[in-house]
Image: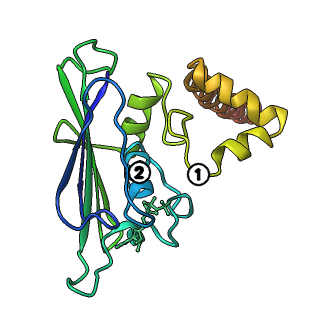
Protein backbone atom coordinates (compact mmCIF):
# COMPACT_ATOMS: atom_id res chain seq x y z
CA UNK A 1 0.00 0.00 0.00
CA UNK A 2 2.53 2.62 -1.05
CA UNK A 3 1.68 6.25 -0.45
CA UNK A 4 1.14 7.75 -3.91
CA UNK A 5 0.13 11.32 -3.22
CA UNK A 6 -0.22 13.90 -0.51
CA UNK A 7 -2.60 16.76 -1.26
CA UNK A 8 -2.49 19.80 1.02
CA UNK A 9 -4.90 22.70 0.87
CA UNK A 10 -4.80 25.43 3.51
CA UNK A 11 -2.61 23.36 5.85
CA UNK A 12 -0.12 25.58 7.72
CA UNK A 13 2.18 27.28 5.16
CA UNK A 14 0.45 25.50 2.23
CA UNK A 15 -2.21 28.10 1.47
CA UNK A 16 -2.66 26.93 -2.12
CA UNK A 17 -3.58 23.43 -3.13
CA UNK A 18 -0.28 21.52 -3.33
CA UNK A 19 0.15 17.95 -4.53
CA UNK A 20 3.24 15.93 -3.68
CA UNK A 21 3.71 12.76 -5.73
CA UNK A 22 5.58 9.86 -4.17
CA UNK A 23 6.99 7.70 -6.94
CA UNK A 24 8.64 4.34 -6.30
CA UNK A 25 11.98 4.60 -4.50
CA UNK A 26 12.98 7.41 -2.19
CA UNK A 27 11.42 10.86 -2.32
CA UNK A 28 13.50 13.66 -0.83
CA UNK A 29 12.06 17.05 0.04
CA UNK A 30 14.60 19.81 0.38
CA UNK A 31 14.21 23.49 1.15
CA UNK A 32 15.55 26.30 3.31
CA UNK A 33 14.76 26.61 7.01
CA UNK A 34 11.12 27.45 7.60
CA UNK A 35 10.02 26.50 4.10
CA UNK A 36 7.54 23.88 5.33
CA UNK A 37 9.35 20.50 5.25
CA UNK A 38 8.20 19.53 8.75
CA UNK A 39 4.70 20.78 7.92
CA UNK A 40 4.53 18.03 5.31
CA UNK A 41 5.15 15.20 7.80
CA UNK A 42 2.78 16.88 10.25
CA UNK A 43 0.10 16.91 7.55
CA UNK A 44 0.54 13.15 7.11
CA UNK A 45 0.29 12.56 10.87
CA UNK A 46 -2.76 14.82 11.06
CA UNK A 47 -4.68 12.80 8.45
CA UNK A 48 -3.70 9.58 10.20
CA UNK A 49 -5.56 10.78 13.28
CA UNK A 50 -3.25 13.02 15.32
CA UNK A 51 -5.40 14.73 17.92
CA UNK A 52 -2.74 16.59 19.88
CA UNK A 53 -2.36 20.18 18.64
CA UNK A 54 0.82 20.43 20.71
CA UNK A 55 2.51 17.65 18.80
CA UNK A 56 1.71 19.61 15.63
CA UNK A 57 3.40 22.64 17.20
CA UNK A 58 0.15 24.52 17.80
CA UNK A 59 -1.93 25.58 20.80
CA UNK A 60 -5.26 24.60 19.28
CA UNK A 61 -6.00 22.26 16.38
CA UNK A 62 -7.34 25.10 14.26
CA UNK A 63 -3.83 26.64 14.37
CA UNK A 64 -2.97 24.30 11.52
CA UNK A 65 -5.19 26.35 9.18
CA UNK A 66 -3.21 28.84 7.06
CA UNK A 67 -3.01 31.89 9.31
CA UNK A 68 -2.40 34.46 6.57
CA UNK A 69 0.69 36.31 5.45
CA UNK A 70 1.63 39.87 4.48
CA UNK A 71 0.18 39.31 1.03
CA UNK A 72 -2.89 37.19 1.73
CA UNK A 73 -5.63 36.83 4.33
CA UNK A 74 -6.07 33.78 6.57
CA UNK A 75 -8.11 30.84 5.32
CA UNK A 76 -11.10 29.29 7.07
CA UNK A 77 -10.46 25.70 6.19
CA UNK A 78 -7.61 23.20 5.92
CA UNK A 79 -7.84 19.94 4.05
CA UNK A 80 -5.28 17.18 3.56
CA UNK A 81 -5.61 13.91 1.64
CA UNK A 82 -3.40 10.84 1.53
CA UNK A 83 -3.76 8.70 -1.58
CA UNK A 84 -2.62 5.07 -1.25
CA UNK A 85 -2.08 2.48 -3.96
CA UNK A 86 -4.14 -0.44 -2.64
CA UNK A 87 -3.57 -3.03 -5.37
CA UNK A 88 -2.19 -5.34 -2.67
CA UNK A 89 -5.45 -4.89 -0.66
CA UNK A 90 -3.43 -4.28 2.51
CA UNK A 91 -5.89 -1.57 3.47
CA UNK A 92 -9.22 -3.17 4.23
CA UNK A 93 -11.02 -1.75 1.16
CA UNK A 94 -11.85 -3.43 -2.11
CA UNK A 95 -10.47 -0.52 -4.16
CA UNK A 96 -7.20 -0.18 -6.05
CA UNK A 97 -6.81 3.29 -4.60
CA UNK A 98 -7.76 4.51 -1.13
CA UNK A 99 -7.97 8.21 -0.33
CA UNK A 100 -8.06 9.29 3.29
CA UNK A 101 -9.05 12.92 3.90
CA UNK A 102 -9.30 15.14 6.94
CA UNK A 103 -10.76 18.64 6.99
CA UNK A 104 -10.96 21.26 9.71
CA UNK A 105 -12.90 24.52 9.84
CA UNK A 106 -12.07 27.62 11.92
CA UNK A 107 -15.05 26.67 14.11
CA UNK A 108 -12.92 23.65 15.12
CA UNK A 109 -15.23 21.15 13.37
CA UNK A 110 -13.42 18.20 11.80
CA UNK A 111 -14.54 16.00 8.95
CA UNK A 112 -13.02 12.61 8.09
CA UNK A 113 -13.48 10.82 4.79
CA UNK A 114 -12.35 7.56 3.25
CA UNK A 115 -12.85 7.46 -0.52
CA UNK A 116 -15.14 10.50 -0.19
CA UNK A 117 -17.42 8.75 2.30
CA UNK A 118 -17.83 10.42 5.67
CA UNK A 119 -16.37 8.31 8.49
CA UNK A 120 -15.40 8.68 12.15
CA UNK A 121 -11.89 9.46 13.39
CA UNK A 122 -11.96 6.00 14.95
CA UNK A 123 -12.45 4.42 11.50
CA UNK A 124 -9.39 6.19 10.15
CA UNK A 125 -7.29 5.16 13.13
CA UNK A 126 -8.48 1.56 12.81
CA UNK A 127 -7.75 1.52 9.08
CA UNK A 128 -4.11 2.37 9.76
CA UNK A 129 -3.80 0.31 12.91
CA UNK A 130 -4.79 -2.80 10.93
CA UNK A 131 -1.60 -2.38 8.91
CA UNK A 132 0.55 -1.62 11.97
CA UNK A 133 0.55 2.15 11.53
CA UNK A 134 -0.65 5.09 13.57
CA UNK A 135 -0.21 8.86 13.64
CA UNK A 136 2.33 8.19 16.38
CA UNK A 137 4.01 5.45 14.40
CA UNK A 138 7.74 5.07 13.95
CA UNK A 139 7.11 5.07 10.22
CA UNK A 140 7.28 8.83 10.76
CA UNK A 141 10.32 10.01 12.70
CA UNK A 142 10.14 13.71 13.46
CA UNK A 143 12.92 15.96 14.72
CA UNK A 144 13.99 15.04 18.24
CA UNK A 145 12.23 11.65 18.10
CA UNK A 146 15.48 9.64 17.88
CA UNK A 147 16.71 11.19 21.15
CA UNK A 148 13.33 10.53 22.70
CA UNK A 149 13.44 6.84 21.73
CA UNK A 150 17.02 6.40 22.95
CA UNK A 151 16.14 7.98 26.30
CA UNK A 152 12.82 6.16 26.71
CA UNK A 153 11.96 3.75 29.52
CA UNK A 154 11.79 -0.02 28.88
CA UNK A 155 7.97 -0.02 28.97
CA UNK A 156 7.81 2.75 26.39
CA UNK A 157 10.31 0.96 24.17
CA UNK A 158 8.24 -2.21 24.38
CA UNK A 159 5.24 -0.41 22.91
CA UNK A 160 7.42 0.61 19.93
CA UNK A 161 8.11 -3.07 19.17
CA UNK A 162 4.48 -3.97 19.78
CA UNK A 163 3.38 -1.40 17.27
CA UNK A 164 5.91 -2.59 14.67
CA UNK A 165 4.74 -6.18 15.18
CA UNK A 166 1.11 -5.11 14.76
CA UNK A 167 0.22 -6.20 18.31
CA UNK A 168 -1.00 -2.79 19.45
CA UNK A 169 -4.36 -3.09 17.71
CA UNK A 170 -5.10 -6.41 19.45
CA UNK A 171 -3.95 -4.97 22.77
CA UNK A 172 -6.44 -2.12 22.42
CA UNK A 173 -9.19 -4.54 21.42
CA UNK A 174 -8.35 -6.63 24.49
CA UNK A 175 -8.56 -3.58 26.75
CA UNK A 176 -11.99 -2.68 25.30
CA UNK A 177 -13.19 -6.29 25.75
CA UNK A 178 -11.93 -6.35 29.37
CA UNK A 179 -13.79 -3.11 30.13
CA UNK A 180 -16.97 -4.57 28.63
CA UNK A 181 -16.50 -7.74 30.71
CA UNK A 182 -16.10 -5.67 33.87
CA UNK A 183 -19.24 -3.71 33.01
CA UNK A 184 -21.14 -6.96 32.40
CA UNK A 185 -19.92 -8.38 35.73
CA UNK A 186 -21.12 -5.24 37.50
CA UNK A 187 -24.50 -5.58 35.79
CA UNK A 188 -24.69 -9.23 36.87
CA UNK A 189 -23.93 -8.31 40.49
CA UNK A 190 -26.66 -5.68 40.38
CA UNK A 191 -29.18 -8.13 38.85
CA UNK A 192 -28.33 -10.76 41.49
CA UNK A 193 -28.93 -8.16 44.22
CA UNK A 194 -32.31 -7.30 42.70
CA UNK A 195 -33.26 -10.99 42.42
CA UNK A 196 -32.34 -11.49 46.09
CA UNK A 197 -34.47 -8.49 47.08
CA UNK A 198 -37.43 -9.93 45.18
CA UNK A 199 -37.09 -13.45 46.71
P1 LIG B 1 13.51 23.66 9.35
O1 LIG B 1 14.42 23.24 8.22
O2 LIG B 1 14.02 24.87 10.07
O3 LIG B 1 13.12 22.55 10.28
P2 LIG B 1 11.05 23.43 7.83
O4 LIG B 1 11.33 23.50 6.37
O5 LIG B 1 10.83 22.07 8.41
O6 LIG B 1 12.15 24.21 8.65
P3 LIG B 1 8.50 24.07 8.92
O7 LIG B 1 8.85 24.03 10.36
O8 LIG B 1 7.79 22.90 8.33
O9 LIG B 1 9.81 24.37 8.08
O10 LIG B 1 7.62 25.35 8.56
C1 LIG B 1 7.58 26.45 9.37
C2 LIG B 1 6.86 27.54 8.60
O11 LIG B 1 5.47 27.25 8.55
C3 LIG B 1 7.04 28.87 9.30
O12 LIG B 1 7.40 29.83 8.31
C4 LIG B 1 5.68 29.18 9.84
O13 LIG B 1 5.40 30.54 9.83
C5 LIG B 1 4.79 28.44 8.86
N1 LIG B 1 3.50 28.12 9.47
C6 LIG B 1 3.25 27.30 10.50
N2 LIG B 1 1.93 27.29 10.80
C7 LIG B 1 1.35 28.13 9.91
C8 LIG B 1 0.00 28.58 9.70
N3 LIG B 1 -1.02 28.12 10.44
N4 LIG B 1 -0.22 29.46 8.71
C9 LIG B 1 0.78 29.92 7.94
N5 LIG B 1 2.06 29.54 8.09
C10 LIG B 1 2.35 28.67 9.06
Q: Which mark is residue 143?
A: 1
Task: Say which of 60 and 13 sits in front.
Answer: 13
Badge count: 2
Categorize mark 2 by other alpha carbons within 10 Å: few (<14), some (14-19), many (20+).
many
Q: Is mark 1 within 8 Å of ligand 1?
A: yes
- Residue 156 at what x, y percent from top left? 75, 36
Q: Quadrant of residue 176?
A: top right
Q: Which residue is mark 2?
A: 46
Q: Is residue 65 left or right of residue 184?
A: left
- Residue 130 at what x, y percent from top left? 45, 23
Q: Is residue 83 visible?
A: yes
Categorize mark 1 by other alpha carbons within 10 Å: few (<14), some (14-19), many (20+).
few
Tell us which disc is closer to us: 1 or 2.
1
Task: Say which of 66 and 112 sits in front.
Answer: 66
Q: Where, quadrant-wise, is the N terminus in this rendering?
A: top left
What is the CA distance from the residue labelled 1 to the residue labelled 2?
16 Å
Q: Quadrant of residue 186?
A: top right
Q: Is residue 188 visible?
A: no
Residue at 54% across / 36% down in the picture?
137
Q: Is residue 169 left or right of residue 32?
A: right
Outermost residue, top side: 88
Q: Secondary structure at mark 2?
A: helix
Residue at 21% across / 85% down in the picture?
71
Residue 161 to residue 80: above or below: above
Residue at 37% across / 64% down in the picture?
35
Q: Where, quadrant-wise, is the C terminus in this rendering?
A: top right
Residue 149 to residue 96: above or below: below
Outermost residue, right side: 154
- Residue 3 at what x, y percent from top left? 30, 31
Task: Say which of 177 and 107 sits in front.
Answer: 107
Amino acid sequence: MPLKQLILNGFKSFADKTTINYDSGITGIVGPNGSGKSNITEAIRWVMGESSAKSLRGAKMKDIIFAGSQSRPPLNKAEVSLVFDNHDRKLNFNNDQVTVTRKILRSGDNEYLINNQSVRLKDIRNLFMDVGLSHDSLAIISQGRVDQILNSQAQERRSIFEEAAGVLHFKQQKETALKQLEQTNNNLIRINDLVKELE
